[in-house]
Amino acid sequence: KHRRDFTYVDDIVEGVIRVLDKPAAPNPNWSGDNPDSGTSTAPWRVYNIGNNSPVELLDYIGAIEEALGIKAAKELLPLQPGDVPDTYADVDDLVKEFNYKPSMSVNQGVSNFIEWYKKYHKL
């Protein structure tokens, strides 16, 4: 039942291009007493570029099955030590500063990838 953020490669590329078009500036309010790990007094910034919409692993597998037209042989195991049940990107800064939020759905993204993969490998 764990969930992961699915982010399509084209959404990542678009996010990187938007960030490159606006070079980072130092954060004049940055303080070592209360540091913001995404900024600095130096001219750099860190942005999460993700879909911000976690998908259950079985839904991701279902999208692959649908795109390929076959059922996967699944061997489900419990979460392993160190596994995180849910992860997803916090894209608030990306939206606020660049008015951009990745939006490709898992079903469409998997379908696009499989279509590309088959064409590229002539399958």
Image (tube, helix red, strand yellow):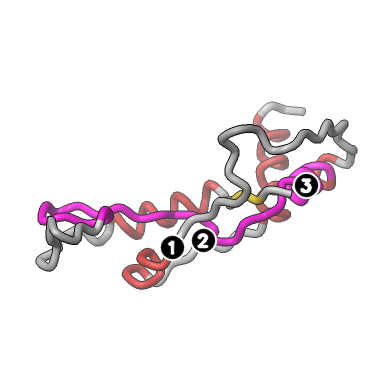
Q: Which residue is mark 3?
A: 58
Residue at 41 percent of width and 54 percent of height: 48
The image's mark for residue 19 is none
10 sits left or right of 81 in the view? left
- Specify whether 20 is left or right of 70: left
- Judging by the rendered image, the residue that carries numbered circle 2 is 102
Q: Amino acid at mark 3?
A: Leu
Look at 16% across and 55% down and name the residue there.
Answer: 40
What's the magenta region? 37-65
Residues 103 and 1: in front is: 1
The quadrant in which residue 65 appears is top right
Q: Which residue is mark 1?
A: 91
- Counting from the top left corner in percent of width and height, residue 9 is at 53, 46
How many labels, in total?
A: 3
Q: CA distance from mark 2 to mark 3?
A: 22 Å
The amino acid sitting under disc 2 is Pro
Rounded to the nearest whole Å, what is the CA distance between mark 1 and mark 2? 9 Å
